[in-house]
Amino acid sequence: MQQIDNGVKSTLIEGVAWQKSRHSGPGGNCVELAALPGGDVAIRNSRHPEGPALIYTREEVAAFLDGAKGGEFDAMVGEGRLL
């Protein structure tokens, strides 16, 4: 199994399918996720697909998604801008 470290160049992660939200705009301003062998999740910036990937556990991603679904981060992107 390939050893995948946090911050690895995304293009070096082999055999994964990157996925972005269907809500992503045509300008590519989104993050992409890929399920990794072993259960971790890689996340990269869709505007820089050759850039680094951050690696999280499934539990960490689930906790973030639960918070996002619950509105915990809404103030950070209010009215289309970061506060």
Image: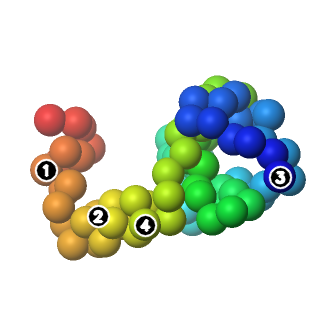
Callout 2, which amino acid?
Answer: Ala
Report the residue marked by disc 2. Answer: 68
* N-terminal label among 2 and 3: 3
User: Residue 30's x, y, as percent?
Assistant: 51, 46
Residues at marks 2 and 1, CA–CA distance in whole angstroms: 11 Å
* N-terminal label among 4 and 1: 4
Residue nearest the viewer, comparing 2 with 43: 2
In the displayed structure image, the side of residue 73 where residue 14 appears, left or right:
right
Q: Nearer the viewer, mark 4 or mark 1?
A: 4
On residue 1, which mark appears? Answer: 3
* Screen quadrant of the C terminus: top left
Q: Secondary structure at mark 3?
A: loop
Residues at marks 2 and 3, CA–CA distance in whole angstroms: 32 Å
Residues at marks 2 and 4, CA–CA distance in whole angstroms: 14 Å
User: Residue 58's x, y, as percent?
Assistant: 50, 65
Q: Are marks 1 and 3 in contact (CB under 8 Å)?
A: no
Residues at marks 3 and 4, CA–CA distance in whole angstroms: 21 Å
